[in-house]
Image (cartoon, rainbow, N blue to C red):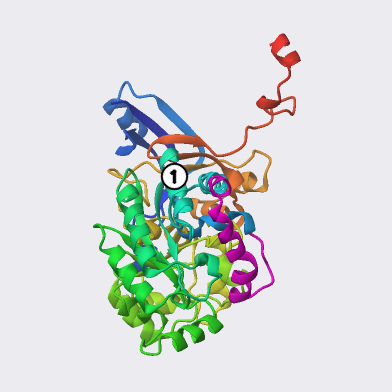
């Protein structure tokens, strides 16, 4: 078993800053063996403990891999459908693209683009809405396995109020989920999530089938949407008049627990939040999507006061990109703009994008870079002449540097992504001194070298 020592300026948030935890910023060494951090401390001590281990000096900042708790695989190519509220956007933008997932070659191409995009964005763990098509969802799992990706995902199901070609039946939903669970759940870093699209596209019989799927194997998760848009919440209230509120529909069908994540919840009455807190379910806050679709500003204070765990989601393609740096900044904006907004610092944004997400997805092995954790990490190393590089060179402290990463950082500022200790170059090859990338070298270059 070989050990590698990484020496870097490491920033992470092992303790919840919403209850007094602080940003941990240390220049230190991490010894990594078989993808696990076996030592964290001074470089001299690491060298003494592992005299044969190579030392890799990571320039810039080393952060934990980011965790996206709500993102749709079939929607990568429709990012940017601006100018519509939720239900129009679904009909005109999202659902036509979802229907294309029935073409295997199309789904396979999008799966590669999607996973490549997540990795490039430094997102090393994700809870993913699969497709309505079981074959496409299977393709997604296969692609994630090939990449060694830490993914929880599931077949999306609905049997009313969608396009007819996306409708399933309770029997078919139950059978297809069972097959996917047996094929993928618990294999490597893959897990299954039962995924009703939302209550509005579900009959009671379909939600009962979802409850059966949840008990198909231990550790299966559940995810869906909730309280995103007022027209949607009103329609759900009409469809399920016996439920007290929108999230109660899922609760009434036995779908909510600590292994459930509901996206959005921007129109959540406080009594409903208190009932939701009692289930243990977490909420995926997707601020870019909420702004792009004009849904609402997220009531974070109400969530935290009620005791509902909150993490971040990109909600691509309602969201405007896969970068969780942008989602962190947008979460900050939402709170700045709400009269009861919570003042968020960079430590809150990093926590929401890492440790909080890992907890919501029941992935205690990731989220921060302590001993015993998996080495899922990203090197933040902006181009030398970029504004962010200049800001980082002159930042008075780590907190200001991290704030600048959320304010201006993009996927392009990430040079390397490690997943379970395995490095993946994130950024495209740098231009050589001649201005060409290595792949653009010519025969003449070879002759003179
Ligand atoms: Zn969504």
Is residue 86 one of those drawn in magenta? yes
Above or below: residue 126 compared with residue 5: below
Q: The magenta stretch spans which residues?
A: 79-108
Which of the 4 image quarters holds residue 46?
top left
- Residue plotted at (35% across, 55% down): 192
Quickly name the residue at label 1.
144
- Tell me if 243 is positioned left or right of 63 in this view: left
Q: What kind of secondary structure does the magenta stretch mostly adopt?
A: helix
Which of the 4 image quarters holds residue 76?
bottom right
| 28 or 212, nearer to the observer | 212
- Residue plotted at (34% across, 60% down): 175
Is residue 330 one of those drawn in magenta? no
Q: Tell me the element at label 1.
A: helix
| 8 or 284, nearer to the observer | 284
Residue 356: x and y in percent read: 38, 60
| 426 or 200, nearer to the observer | 200
Residue 244: x and y in percent read: 36, 88
- Tell me if 71 is positioned left or right of 404 in this view: left
Above or below: residue 340 compared with residue 154: below
Residue 176: x and y in percent read: 37, 58
Above or below: residue 272 compared with residue 31: below
């Amino acid at each position: 078993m070989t050990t590698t020592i990484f020496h870097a300026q490491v920033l992470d948030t092992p303790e919840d800053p919403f209850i007094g935890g602080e940003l941990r910023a240390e220049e230190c060494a991490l010894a990594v063996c078989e993808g696990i951090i076996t030592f964290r401390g001074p470089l001299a001590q690491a060298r003494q403990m592992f005299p044969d281990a190579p030392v890799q000096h990571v320039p810039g900042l080393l952060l934990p891999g980011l965790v996206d708790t709500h993102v749709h695989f079939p929607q990568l190519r429709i990012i940017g459908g601006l100018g519509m509220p939720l239900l129009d956007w679904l009909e005109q933008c999202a659902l036509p693209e979802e229907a294309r997932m029935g073409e295997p070659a199309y789904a396979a191409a999008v799966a590669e683009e999607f996973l490549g995009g997540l990795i490039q964005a430094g997102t090393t763990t994700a809870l993913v809405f699969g497709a309505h098509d079981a074959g496409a969802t299977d393709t997604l799992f296969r692609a994630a396995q090939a990449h060694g990706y830490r993914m929880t995902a599931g077949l999306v199901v609905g049997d009313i109020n969608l396009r007819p070609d996306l409708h399933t039946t309770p029997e078919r939903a139950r059978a297809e989920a069972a097959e996917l669970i047996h094929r993928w759940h618990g294999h490597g870093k893959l897990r299954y999530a039962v995924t009703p699209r939302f209550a509005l596209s579900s009959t009671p019989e379909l939600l009962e089938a979802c409850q059966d799927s949840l008990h198909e194997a231990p550790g299966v998760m559940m995810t869906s949407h909730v309280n995103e848009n007022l027209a949607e919440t009103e329609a759900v209230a009409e469809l399920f008049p016996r439920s007290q509120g929108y999230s109660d529909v899922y609760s009434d069908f036995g779908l909510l627990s600590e292994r459930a994540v509901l996206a959005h919840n921007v129109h959540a009455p406080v009594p409903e939040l208190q009932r939701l807190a009692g289930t243990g379910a977490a909420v995926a806050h997707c601020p870019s999507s909420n702004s792009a679709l004009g849904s609402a500003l997220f009531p974070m204070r109400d969530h935290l006061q009620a005791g509902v765990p909150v993490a971040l989601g990109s909600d691509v393609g309602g969201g405007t990109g896969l970068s969780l740096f942008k989602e962190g900044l947008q979460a900050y904006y939402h709170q700045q703009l709400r009269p009861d907004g919570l003042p968020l610092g960079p430590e809150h944004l990093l926590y929401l994008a890492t440790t909080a997400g890992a907890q919501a997805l029941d992935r205690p092995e990731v989220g921060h870079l302590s001993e015993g954790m998996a080495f899922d990490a990203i090197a933040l190393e902006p181009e030398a002449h970029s504004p962010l590089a200049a800001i980082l060179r002159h930042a008075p402290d780590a907190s200001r540097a991290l704030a600048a990463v959320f304010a201006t950082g993009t996927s392009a500022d990430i040079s390397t992504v490690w997943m379970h200790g395995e490095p993946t170059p994130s950024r495209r090859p740098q231009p050589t001194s001649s201005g060409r990338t290595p792949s653009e070298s010519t025969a003449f270059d070879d002759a003179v070298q």
